[in-house]
Amino acid sequence: MTKSAKSVRNKIAIISSLLFLVVLVSMSSITPNVLAAEPQFNNPTFIGVNPSNRVFVSDSHNDRIQKFSKTGTFIRKWGTPGTGDGQFDIPIGVGVDSSGNVFVGDSGNNRIQKFTNTGTFITKWGTFGTMSVSSVMVPFG
């Protein structure tokens, strides 16, 4: 399930289809859930929710994906800036399939990357191009 994240001053408020509220915070206090300094955001854009209700956030300008419990507890992050496997250049989209695999729209690298729900790289597809079958231009959402 993929949802658009409402990003206001690098904070995310998510209301899932299960009607729970998760608030992920960047270095400030806000209720109902305040997180430690670890999950700082720089332009979070989309979220994905896996079958276990884990929340994945595309943290675009930090070039990474962050994973949280359904109550907002930070679990892990993965990704660094770059063009290699598991690296990102402005990941603006994230989605999760029914098996829990995470798909990231790596917009600056014009590709989609697939990961396990723990962040292990599985595969990638897409290249920048001129409308060929493998061409991808700024994937998101």
Image: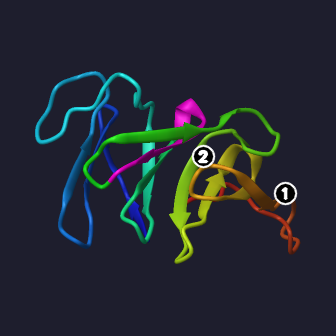
Q: Residue 42: x percent and y percent?
A: 45, 30
What residue do we see at 54% from left, 32% from top? 61
Please give the range of residues in magenta: 60-69
What residue do we see at 40% from left, 66% from top? 52
Q: Which residue is mark 1?
A: 127
Q: Residues within 10 Å of mark 2 (few under 14, many from 20)?
A: many
- Inspect the image, locate mark 1, and give the three-letter code of the amino acid beneath it: Thr
Q: Are marks 1 and 2 in contact (CB under 8 Å)?
A: no
What is the number of callouts on the image?
Answer: 2
The answer to whether residue 91 of the structure is visible from this angle is: yes
Answer left or right for 41 relative to 28. Answer: right
Q: Residue furthest left?
A: 31
Q: Residue 136: x percent and y percent?
A: 76, 62
SS label for mark 2: strand
Q: Which residue is mark 2?
A: 91
Q: Nearer the viewer, residue 36 or 19?
A: 36
Position of residue 4 relative to residue 133, above or below, is above
What residue do we see at 44% from left, 54% from top? 46
